[in-house]
Every structure is written in C-alpha cells, then in structure tokens.
Image (cartoon, rainbow, N blue to C red):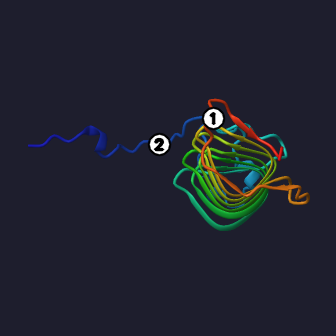
Amino acid sequence: MALQSPFFNKRENEPYNPRQGAVNPNAAAVAGAVSTAAAAPTTPAANSAPVKEGESKLTVGPNIKLKGVEITDCDTLVVEGSVEATMDSRVIQISERGSFKGSADIDIAEIRGHFEGVLNARQKLVIYSTGKVTGKVRYGTIVIEEGGQLSGEIEFGSAATKTATAPTAVTSSRTGLQNVLSSAG
C-alpha cells in the first residue's frame, strides 16, 4: 500500500487569513481601476542601477525578443535579450548575451554583446572585450578593450559635422591596455 503525503490531503475548512503586510502581485489586474503609478514598485530591482527621478529606463530581459519597434523617450535602454529596432536615446547598454539590430542615435553606447546596423554614438562608444559592433558607426570618442571587435564603415564626429571619414575594419585590439582611437588623421 502506498503512503500519501499529508501535504496534499484536503484541508479542513479554515478561514482565509492573508499575512499582514503582504502584497498581492495580481492586485493591479484585479482592481482594474487602480492607476499604474500606485501599482508600480517603489524600490528599484536589486541588480539594476537606480534611475534618477524623471528618467526612463527600459530593460529587455534575457530570452526576450523585441522586434520591429521604434523606441522613443527612453533615457536608458538595457539589452539583455534581442532587440530589432530604431531608437534615439541617451544611453544604450548591451550585455554579453544581448544583441541589438537596427539603427540607434545614442549619446553613450556601452557594448558587451552584439550590435549590428547604424550606430551614431554622439559622445562616447565603449566596446568591451566581449563586444562586437558591425555596420555603419559614427562616434565622438571611442574606447575598445582588448578583444573587442569593430568592423564596417567607421567615422569620427557627429552627424552634423563630417570632419574625418575613416572607413576601416578593426577586428580586435592587440595591446594589454584599452585602445583609444581618435581622429588624429
């Protein structure tokens, strides 16, 4: 005869007493008329940098694919999954497993994963050792860690000022220090 666990037995009729201070994660969906501001958590996630008041941050998590969109009014885009989009933002951060395909006008780009397409990093482009950037790239300043890859049509300067054009293919930096490329002709 098989023994059954008492854990799965039918409960006696007990009154339902929710824990004091517990938050129902489905409360916003049930209430319907509750504003999204009231349902939003007040503390940032433990692994993300705090967002300053008035700034917006979009995180595309691991195993998430976002395709065919235009991202606007986003201060920081964090890509941990896959994004195919066009965007104009302040900061993009692509994690080691993240990938972005499309076009981006960005102040600061930090690439640890893959970027393919048109990238205009108005202020600074940082390609870490695991990063790979291909396509048409324009930058204000650039930093490439050893192992970082950059290939395609590369230009220095913002879109408004085409000062120096340097079509080149940099596949990997070879020094132990970070390479800083500039427009020193």
| Residue for badge 1 | 46
Residue 76 in picture, x, y percent from top left: 75, 48
Res. 135 image quadrant: bottom right
Res. 30 image quadrant: bottom right
**Label 1 sits on what residue type?**
Ala
> Where 176 falls versus 165 (above or below)?
above
* Residue sticking out furthest to the right: 161
Res. 118 image quadrant: bottom right
Residue at image position (58%, 40%) is 147
* Residue sticking out furthest to the bottom: 68
> Where 70 falls versus 80 (above or below)?
below
Residue at image position (62%, 30%) is 176
* Residue sticking out furthest to the front: 185
Task: Report the mark closest to the observer, 2 or 1.
Answer: 1
* Residue 78 or residue 14, whichever sits in front: 78
Q: How much space separates mark 2 and mark 1, taking CA atoms? A: 35 Å
Residue 37 in picture, x, y percent from top left: 76, 51
Residue 62 in picture, x, y percent from top left: 54, 50
**Label 2 sits on what residue type?**
Pro
* Apparent side of residue 109 relative to residue 128 in the rendered image (left or right): right
Pointer 1: residues within 10 angstroms few (<14), some, or many (20+)?
few
* Apparent side of residue 64 relative to residue 169 in the rendered image (left or right): left
